[in-house]
Amino acid sequence: MIIVRLNPEINIKQISRIIRLIENSGFVPHLSKSGRVTQIGVIGDNAGLLNDIHRLSGVAEVVQTREPFKLVSREYRGSDTLVKIGDVIVGGKGVVVMAGPCAVENPVQMLKIARAVRKSGANILRGGAFKPRTSPYSFQGLKEEGLKILARVRNETGLPVVTEVISSSNVALVSKYADVLQIGARNMQNYALLEEVGRTRKPVLLKRGMMSTLEELLMSAEYILSKGNPNVILCERGIRTFEKYTRNTLDISAVPVLKQKTHLPVIVDPSHATGVRAIVPAVSRAAVAAGADGLIIEVHNNPDKALSDGFQSISPLEFARLMKDLKLVCHAIGRSISVGPHT
Amino acid sequence: MIIVRLNPEINIKQISRIIRLIENSGFVPHLSKSGRVTQIGVIGDNAGLLNDIHRLSGVAEVVQTREPFKLVSREYRGSDTLVKIGDVIVGGKGVVVMAGPCAVENPVQMLKIARAVRKSGANILRGGAFKPRTSPYSFQGLKEEGLKILARVRNETGLPVVTEVISSSNVALVSKYADVLQIGARNMQNYALLEEVGRTRKPVLLKRGMMSTLEELLMSAEYILSKGNPNVILCERGIRTFEKYTRNTLDISAVPVLKQKTHLPVIVDPSHATGVRAIVPAVSRAAVAAGADGLIIEVHNNPDKALSDGFQSISPLEFARLMKDLKLVCHAIGRSISVGPHT
Amino acid sequence: MIIVRLNPEINIKQISRIIRLIENSGFVPHLSKSGRVTQIGVIGDNAGLLNDIHRLSGVAEVVQTREPFKLVSREYRGSDTLVKIGDVIVGGKGVVVMAGPCAVENPVQMLKIARAVRKSGANILRGGAFKPRTSPYSFQGLKEEGLKILARVRNETGLPVVTEVISSSNVALVSKYADVLQIGARNMQNYALLEEVGRTRKPVLLKRGMMSTLEELLMSAEYILSKGNPNVILCERGIRTFEKYTRNTLDISAVPVLKQKTHLPVIVDPSHATGVRAIVPAVSRAAVAAGADGLIIEVHNNPDKALSDGFQSISPLEFARLMKDLKLVCHAIGRSISVGPHT
Amino acid sequence: MIIVRLNPEINIKQISRIIRLIENSGFVPHLSKSGRVTQIGVIGDNAGLLNDIHRLSGVAEVVQTREPFKLVSREYRGSDTLVKIGDVIVGGKGVVVMAGPCAVENPVQMLKIARAVRKSGANILRGGAFKPRTSPYSFQGLKEEGLKILARVRNETGLPVVTEVISSSNVALVSKYADVLQIGARNMQNYALLEEVGRTRKPVLLKRGMMSTLEELLMSAEYILSKGNPNVILCERGIRTFEKYTRNTLDISAVPVLKQKTHLPVIVDPSHATGVRAIVPAVSRAAVAAGADGLIIEVHNNPDKALSDGFQSISPLEFARLMKDLKLVCHAIGRSISVGPHT
């Protein structure tokens, strides 16, 4: 990709000429603003173009990027992307906490948990309606019924809702009910699905595959941005290793590495990363201290009877205690737990 | 799952009574034949049923399986599944070789390679029309145009065609042209896609995810069988490790382990497993010696100019030499390279 | 192992009878105190003994442990082990920071770095005199000359010294100069070396092998304790995975898991775990927030010219900034950076 | 390293002049013969030397190697190294089979197994006298008593003996009894031990660490060769991955990759690589088909009662059957099972 940084004093006529040159050369111009600077990204094999553009008036600088990812890179956009979910902002100074059960089980359970986590300061409600399961014979979620429950609980509590979409053919349906579309680890390289959510403007929570490098995670985000949706939140949720005490191995370094490589917000899922209830609080504190923009935590009112993932869910009481600890850690690093939603 | 093995002398009335009991208890009976023995698999939480069935006449034995996978297990079906692709059989005594380029590039290339590999003894032609790529900006395949090329080359050479399907919405389209539907490593846990190919009766080549356990691979195959399609071929294609000389690490033990756990045929992809042209022959010999039912090998007439994966493709000449070596190894273990197709 | 918990009011005669029974049965009694409770550990195949001991007076409880490790387990000793290094205590409320260059290069360098890190609050000086290197042709350290430099710098600055011992035949030599014996990742299962440091009473810093499970790390610590040396500090330093942006993958969950399984102190090495200077501060904060009892950080006055590992060393200035941040994180979780040494 | 290839017609005076120049420049000349060609390897930062040597008479060619390993590289020595163990040769046309129990248990057992495997065609007897065990409380081997048993069984059967040495301080002792010194996976980077066996001229069987790259394995072999011992056999024995059906994952590609990079012989340990008795035969066939120069297989007369690793040992009967199969596979690739020893 080449990035064309424009002069702050550039006029409309000059901009038009630049865009025309790019389009006439067969490329697509990607305009973006980073602070006061306007720039145009041009993706593709465009070495020739580089020289021509250089000479046009209004162009401050033309740079060639080295990373394989483009629109998600810090080079393309220096300032942090802020993803708005209702009036909650992910990627800013406030650390956002998403909490709720692994799976939506019934309206009573959802409402109970939602009220409990909201009271402790959670900003977003999580809960799976479509559950991708290793076995075709395991509970696969309540599907549309689950989405409806989520929507009703949002109306009652004001908490925006994040839930997983597992197939490109379901994106429209899930979008109807959810505030954030979650792409699960198994689907990180389901490109048809990435392109489909890329065609919406809904915020997307993109989880790292358990076998994927950070570069591959960024490339998958690039799929979404390249289709026009800039509202992507990255999520580290543990990778697969030989260690057996934990379900996965949380790659804590992923947080500062991603914050360096991309302008997108980065959150951590301590529940799937560890699979062990007792260490979720310690790992959550670590994630915030490492610079994560948020957390997504499994909370269940009766973890031992949860329909899925009970062994890694914490109780509302444990969650309340954790939120207090997190406030102190946020404060120590010059941040705070996000407040809101304000409804 | 419980497996109800029936008496060889059972009569229709007795069978009907057994099936009625299963259905009235809310379960689905899965009938199958393994050699002379007919049996019924019943999946689900059915401990109670076990006792009731035991007492019915015509029942020889009722066993409870321990593995999490059911229809794919050796316990459910003792004899090897034979998958028929035209008149080529995968899973029998003959070792089946699938060969061709990574991606379909143009009709001339495809025909040239197809003729070359057929001459050396290949049984099936491979070639990607839809290419799942890490970057949205990489060559994504010729899509339907590629499928049409494949179909024409099949008509000219007689070689059945295996090609990848990357989205549930494309299954019908790809099925129209292809003889075998390939599910790639990245999509091994794309359950919507697995279910969709499960609803067809087309042979499916299911590749192991690059960080999936063998149990997960079997569970993904179970998704396909549980939807009614028994024609699944498993493919070991290397897993992701820390080793850097090779692109992935071929898990050769997967071959005998899978042959022990399941009745489905097992093949090996030495090209993706190694990513190194020079060692493809040695690894191919090893796969056959370990008991693989087939190989899927990337062959390109001009590996250095291939649009993708050239560094791991072997030339038609190298392929011809390899086929000679493989014949000797097959012979040493009491098998042979499959002959055919016979058109 | 069985653990015999004694009655607080037990008398000497009763204790003697218990010990006599254990010894007469062919076992070795391991006495320990955990708070007010005295107990005796008995390792081996001793199911029979369990019944006999149960009946003796003065015995409060006899429990059989399930973990494969014994003396290092929380079951054997409930209260945290405090390892004393001069007047610095590892494992207590204070978080201990060890800092210094990867390798001792010369006296001027060592003194300069030591003064700088002490000024910023470091408690222990690190520096390698014997360097285990992948290549026999790489710089292998200044050996005894390096040890002498470390000892002189300790005398000048008061900072106790931790340095690696790479062979059982060198334990006596290194013990002469060092305050803490470091066992490197490559030697975590060098049992001859573990036994040799187990025969001293020097504090041992045992690093996790890059391929070792936490259970194996605990078993290696067990080797040291079983030879009589209880002064072991465990160190998580990253494990090997497929991720490429970082040198290793820091297993942050190891901190709370180990704190739960063992009474030994646990520290983190963010430098080797990441191999990337820019993210050492973020990962250090995370380690402390996760509950680590300390850190061991590579600091070099001229990272770009370091004889080894320069790319992962931070400068004294960056270290000073990091220490300020760490103080705030410590405070947030109810701890503090350890002060001292007091000389 | 630079490699100085000498003219076949070079005279003594010319050689002396070349060697003098190298030594006067502060380097050590390593002479070797590869077929008819004599060459001198010079390791170190020697760019300057390259030009000077180029001009001397008798020098045919001076090349700079790119690999980090030197004396073990194919560039340094083109022809295969043949390691002689008694009259058995490893690295030639004959495939060498080492077989025996995991641990030496008693003289009767060893003699019984040795006679059985010799009868089936094994060339070398394996058996552990010093056993490195994860737990300090597990059976650690019979130590010197075990070595004596091995020596006596060798005298009775004529089979040379390979056994593990686990500490540099034991190299002299083990060398007294053993024909081949085995370095186990845990000690692959125990450099003190590597250097110590490098100072002997005993054949060394160097096993790959369970999370070591092939480059690191070659660098560890370099440690041995750099101390003067050229008799090194490399052994692939499985690496650690996430897969759970097998104890480790055999990296079958390691065989052709190593054969390409180094002139040293390469063998495979199917027992530790899989940890599953039932698949040892399939994996052994694969190793030979991939080009391995030998195998080291655990055989026990009563696998279920073995003091260690019984679950992965095959019986003498299974071994006899396997040897028949291996002969056919060897034949198919133009090799044979080595005959001998001839005593």
Image (tube, coloured by chain):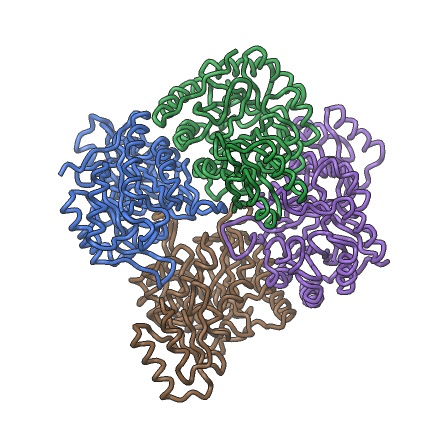
Chain colours: A blue, B brown, C green, D purple
Looking at the image, residue B210 sits to the left or right of residue A207; the answer is right
Q: Position of residue B238 (x, y in %)?
A: 50, 55
The residue that appears at 60% across and 14% down in the rendered structure is C107
Q: Nearer the viewer, residue C53 or D139?
A: C53
Q: Quadrant of residue B76?
A: bottom left
**Is the residue B142 above or below the residue A276 in the image?**
below
User: Is residue B240 left or right of D173 when viewed as pictured?
Assistant: left
Q: Is residue B189 above or below residue D263?
A: below
**Residue D57: % across, % down:** 78, 33
| B143 relative to D25 in the view: left or right | left
Which one is in front, C325 or A189?
C325
- Which quadrant of the structure image shows residue D301? bottom right
- Residue A45 visible, this angle: no
Left/right of residue D305 with respect to residue A155 in the rendered view: right
Q: In this figure, what is the number of numbered marks?
A: 0
Looking at the picture, tell me which residue is in the foreground, A215 or C91: C91
* Position of residue B194 measured from the top left corner of the image (x, y, whole percent): 36, 63
Say above or below: D30 vs C47: above
Residue shown at 72%/57% (left/top)?
Answer: D99
Residue B119 percent coordinates (x, y): 54, 70
Residue B170 shows in the view: yes
Q: On screen, A80 above or below A202?
A: above
Placement of the N terminus of chain C among the 4 image quadrants: top right
Residue at image x 54%, y 52%?
Answer: B276
